[in-house]
Amino acid sequence: MTDDVRNVLTALAAVGEPWQPHRLTSVNDYDVKVVKLLGEFVWHSHPETDELFLVVAGELTIQLRDRDVVLGPNDVFVVPKGVEHCPRADEEVHAILIEPKGTVNTGDAGGARTAEVREIPTSDS
């Protein structure tokens, strides 16, 4: 990973499709990913890890089996490991995810929405 300064808004502008996480940088064994969200994702869990959501723009609802958590700009929520959840964005949301390297976006659900993490291009790429 580069040691250059990275800009979150520039990185988000490079993301073309919703639900396609892009690695912005890494910290130790964790990836910091930028992602655009639109519509409803799939119900899934991450049995081995927590998942942090930080909303940059828009309103994100993280549906849990017992309640909905609504996040606006600058709000953070951690889905504990093993908790089934389904993110939903009625309008486009820009967000940052922090999770261990290798974490699959669809967790234990798999399926058509499983995405390979892409790299954000750097000025030297």
Image: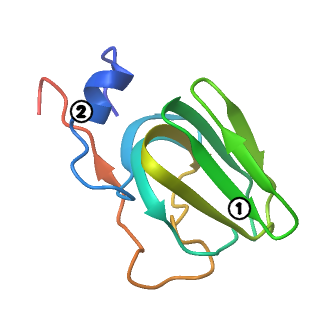
Q: Is residue 37 above or below residue 59?
A: below
Farthest residue, direction right: 66
Q: Earlier in the sequence, mark 1 or mark 2?
A: 2
Residue 102 marker: none
Question: In whole angstroms, how far apart are the C-alphas of marks 1 and 2?
Answer: 26 Å
Q: Is residue 72 above or below residue 118?
A: above
Farthest residue, direction front: 90
Query: What amino acid type should be assigned to the residue bearing mark 1?
Result: Gln
Q: Toward which corner of the image does residue 15 lie, by quadrant?
A: top left
Q: Position of residue 50 (x, y in %)?
A: 74, 53
User: Which residue lies at the image location 51% right of the left edge and 37% below the top edge?
Assistant: 96
Q: Position of residue 14 (x, y in %)?
A: 21, 37
Residue topped by disc 2 = 13
Quarter of the image with the N terminus is top left
Residue topped by disc 1 = 63
Asked whether, in this view, residue 106 is left or right of residue 36, the answer is right
Quarter of the image with the C terminus is top left
